[in-house]
Image: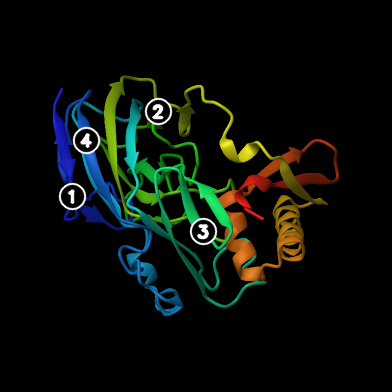
């Protein structure tokens, strides 16, 4: 077993089986990866909303890597143990015009820059979000030739934004090309399931991984093994839950989030833009029911504990 490091120079944009590897590792090796934030450094700790309005999409979600894993072949499985995810002390959340679940409702750019310690982020005055750092984007190169954009996830992983890609988790990925070509980035301080405004608390971080290889055991799509954990602290004061009900899951999700935005504004005297961003980093979207045709139920769970008032 060897220890490796990837730093700022080893980054690329887009998934491509022909991207030269930044590093070759053996199964069982450990790697420390310095990941950029989702803006690729365009948003800094002192940024204003003008930085959001001027974002270059071509520089978004830069990936660290790729890592070539010796012996990996199509049909194999990579098992990636997430050993540590180390926060940077600051992060940002934004409404990016034209992006997000309620893009039609929120057309103007909006930015919240927050600071955090090991326990919580001071997201807004009177609002503390428990810190739960994780990897937003991690995957291997697809089998198909050409460059595949980073924003959507694929069968081989990518921008999954699964909030359980935390330290202690093991991620299984299907290998599609020789060497697998593993890359990662888009690290987050905290996020709700759904990431509804399009951003979490985005932040650069150092990630420590161990990569092992399992011959001929590639899963059909990414899979996670999660460790047992105590009830999260933000669950201990209960929830405000809004719902969306109808024949279209996407519309039901929008309705649940719109209802929650209105509820937070009414109960806590928030601006709609702040409420929308807060839901993105703290509330969880759930499919409560998908069998009672012709209508399905989507629920948005907001933990009351994040509000200090």
Q: Residue at x 56, y 63 (%)?
A: 125
Q: Earlier in the sequence, mark 3 or mark 2?
A: 3
Q: Earlier in the sequence, mark 3 or mark 1?
A: 1
Q: Nearer the viewer, mark 3 or mark 1?
A: 3
Q: CA distance from mark 4 to mark 3?
A: 31 Å
Q: Dot 3 corresponds to which residue?
A: 123
Q: Secondary structure at mark 3?
A: strand
Q: Dot 4 corresponds to which residue?
A: 31
Q: Dot 1 corresponds to which residue?
A: 7
Question: Could you say where residue 295 lies in the image, as x and y percent from the top left?
Answer: 84, 46
Q: Residue at x 35, y 66 (%)?
A: 45
Q: Residue at x 58, y 50 (%)?
A: 282
Q: Residue at x 30, y 52 (%)?
A: 63
Asked if disc 3 and disc 2 are in contact, CB closer than 8 Å, the reply is no
Q: Is residue 107 above or below residue 307?
A: below
Q: Nearer the viewer, mark 3 or mark 2?
A: 3
Q: CA distance from mark 4 to mark 2?
A: 15 Å
Q: CA distance from mark 1 to mark 2?
A: 23 Å
Residue 168 bears which disc, if any? 2
Q: Earlier in the sequence, mark 1 or mark 4?
A: 1
């Amino acid at each position: 077993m060897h220890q490796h490091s990837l730093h700022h120079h080893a980054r690329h944009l887009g998934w491509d089986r022909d991207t030269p590897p930044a590093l070759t590792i053996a199964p069982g090796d450990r790697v420390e990866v310095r990941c950029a934030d989702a803006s690729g450094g365009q948003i800094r700790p002192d940024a204003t909303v003008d930085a959001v309005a001027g974002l270059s999409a071509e520089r978004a979600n830069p990936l660290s890597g790729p890592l070539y894993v010796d012996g990996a072949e199509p049909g194999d499985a990579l098992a990636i143990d997430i050993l540590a995810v180390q926060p940077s002390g600051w992060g940002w959340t934004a409404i990016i015009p034209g992006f997000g679940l309620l893009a039609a409702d929120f057309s103007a750019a909006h930015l919240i820059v927050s600071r955090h310690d090991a326990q919580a982020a001071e997201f807004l005055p009177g609002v503390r979000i428990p810190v739960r750092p994780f990897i937003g984007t991690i995957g291997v190169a697809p089998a198909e030739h050409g460059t595949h954009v980073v924003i959507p996830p694929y069968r081989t992983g990518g921008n999954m934004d699964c909030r359980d890609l935390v330290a202690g988790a093991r991620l299984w990925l299907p290998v599609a090309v020789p060497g697998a070509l593993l890359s990662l980035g888009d690290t987050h301080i905290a996020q709700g399931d759904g990431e509804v405004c399009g951003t979490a608390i985005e932040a650069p971080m150092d990630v420590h991984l161990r990569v092992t290889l399992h011959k001929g055991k590639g899963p059909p799509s990414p899979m996670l093994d999660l460790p047992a954990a105590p009830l999260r602290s933000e669950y201990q004061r209960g929830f405000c839950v809004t719902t969306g009900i109808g024949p279209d899951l996407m519309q039901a999700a929008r309705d649940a989030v719109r209802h929650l935005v209105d509820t937070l504004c009414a109960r806590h005297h928030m601006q709609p833009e702040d409420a929308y961003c807060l839901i993105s980093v703290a509330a969880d979207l759930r499919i409560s029911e998908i069998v009672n045709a012709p209508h399905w139920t989507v629920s948005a769970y907001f933990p009351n504990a994040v509000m200090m008032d």
